Image (cartoon, rainbow, N blue to C red):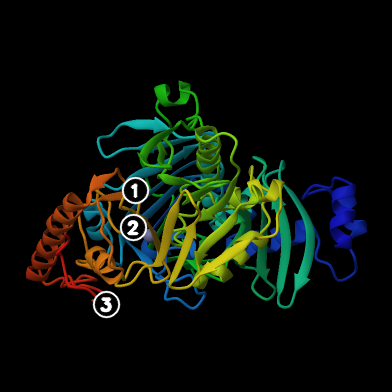
Amino acid sequence: MASRAAWSAFGIGVVAVTSLTFAAAQSPRPAGVIARAAAALGGDARLRAVKTITVAGYGEAAYMNGGGNISASPDAPQKWISIPDYEKTIDLEHGRMRVRQRNHQNFVFAGLAGYLGAPNPAVALLDGAVAYNLAANGRAVRAGDQAVRARRFDMLNNPVVLVRAALDAAARVTNVRTERTLQLGDITVATGETLTLAIDGASGLPSWVRWMAHDENLGDVTFRTSFTGYLPVKGVMLPMGYNTVIDFRGVVQNKLYVDKNAVDEPIDDLAAPTDVRAAAPAPAASPSVEATRVGQGVWLLHGNGGANSILFEFADHLTMFEAPSSQGWTKAVIDRARTTVPGKPLTELAVSHHHFDHTGGIRQAMAEGLTIIAHKGTEGLFREIASRPGTIAPDALGATPKPLKFKAVDDHLRLGDATMQVDLYHVVSNSHMAEGLFAYVPKDRLLVEGDFFDVGWELYWWQKTYADNIAYRKLDVASDVPVHGRVVPIAQAMQDIERMTKAAEAVCTRTQAAGVFMPGCPVKTPAPVGDGFSVR
Ligand SMILES: [Zn+2]
């Protein structure tokens, strides 16, 4: 830490000769670390002359950064998104990048494209300070400032690109230190991003790069990509393996197995089209929430910026079901809850299950001081989330840290008073979530759920799970009130589930006929407890 203070106090740049006298005897000099890395990668002059790099390969990514597994346990098996086709093209001369990739989920879920792999993968580009996306139909649309930041880190997540950026006169290298066999330095590149580079003490080759980014669920997240298996390509050294780990449970966030590194081969023109460059960056959507009454003292809170929440009115307080999507969306939903029933405090949030799309706003709910009511198996995860700092982007919990108030549900919890009764039940017979809750409102025979069913799904892999839960709890359901989708009569939900189940069975038949054996085939009921599709 002493060296950091010395370097930054004097504002010393990477090539400042006067800085050398401040280096502690055994501390590597800033310029020295970058010079060593540059020499190992092919030499200062060669790195500065590189025009293009294309990295092609395949890999895997952790679904929802590790927040989409069957349970909230740190020991739950990781669900992987398969990336059978990946290509990153970097135009170093002009500061441009394009990433093309095909993703599909290596587990069962509701979308056909997500299951089999989208035929036309979305393409992400960066041209200086302009981020834009290329749709399958060739239309280019400018993306927002968050995309610029994320793609700059992605572009720097390559040893040659990073060390070349560190050689730039406008870059700064500080806090140079030694950790075991590695030499580390913090690099702030000309565009302002700061990353930590570690080089191998013996070879000088970059071992890993580390940086921080904001996550709606986790607050500050540190990413660290290790570079391994260097091979020479046209006078520079490039790794054949990238492995990225985050500081949430040590989740391996993504892996890239390189097929080919191409240097200075011809590439497409990655310049942003003139109209894209002239367009304003996509603004953050301003959320608009509607409250639709679906029962006595029950409202569906829905709108343009995220999934639904459900509001329950009790005699002296309000309880919300689900804080989905994002902190900003959940803030808008909470505000709408308060204006829907003025004069009663919102005190509780019930959570259907821990998946990060269902808890994207949980840091907002925690910062509002709401008591989180969820299955007992999720308590550890929510305590982890509550304790994580949020310093980078606007972050509700970072701005207003609060101790977590948690109420655990085992098999059943009744929330009730003279005016309202809501029963929370542990979800059974389900392979999507083993620590889920659904709610039942007897007065209006409403079943309130997250990920039992969505009218918009194409495939259904859980057969009788919904009917099984109704039968197991001996409920008399009239309507499905969902976190995803819209309210429908239960008979329609059951019909749709049969149709979606047949669609999943057809996919299994089709893939198996082609000699491809997919996860979840043949379709089955996870853990049958009830008597099937019969719903009275
Ligand atoms: Zn889910």
First along the sequence among labels 2 and 3: 2
Q: Nearer the viewer, residue 264 or 323?
A: 323
Look at the picture and state if 503 lies above or below 309.
Answer: below
Q: Quadrant of residue 358?
A: bottom left
- Residue named by callout 2: 451
The residue tagged 3 is 527
Question: In the depicted view, which residue is nearer to us: 419 or 424?
Answer: 419
On screen, residue 193 above or below 58: above
Q: Earlier in the sequence, mark 3 or mark 1?
A: 1
Which residue is under mark 1?
484
Question: Is residue 289 rendered to the left or right of residue 442?
Answer: right
- The amino acid sitting under disc 1 is His
Disc 1, ligand 1: is the CB inside 8 Å?
no
Q: Earlier in the sequence, mark 1 or mark 2?
A: 2
State how far apart marks 2 and 3 are (Cα). Answer: 16 Å
**Most extreme residue toward the front, as rendered?**
418
Q: Position of residue 337 (x, y in %)?
A: 51, 38
Q: Which mark is residue 294?
A: none
Residue 348 image point, x, y percent = 56, 53
Q: Is mark 2 within 8 Å of ligand 1?
A: yes
What distance separates the C-alpha of mark 1 from that of mark 2?
Answer: 7 Å
Residue contact between numbered discs 3 and 1, judged by CB atoms under 8 Å: no
* Kind of residue sitting beneath label 3: Ala
Secondary element at tag 2: loop
Give coordinates of residue 132: x percent, y percent: 43, 35
> Where the C terminus falls, by quadrant?
bottom left
Tag 1 and tag 2, C-beta contact below 8 Å: yes
At label 3, counting other C-alpha atoms closer than 10 Å, the crowd grade (few under 14, some 14-19, many 20 or more) is: some
- Residue positioned 55% across, 37% down in the render: 338
The residue that appears at 90% across and 65% down in the rendered structure is 24
**Residue 13, image x, y percentages:** 79, 47
Asked if the residue under mark 3 is in contact with the one under mark 2, i.e. CB atoms within 8 Å, the reply is no
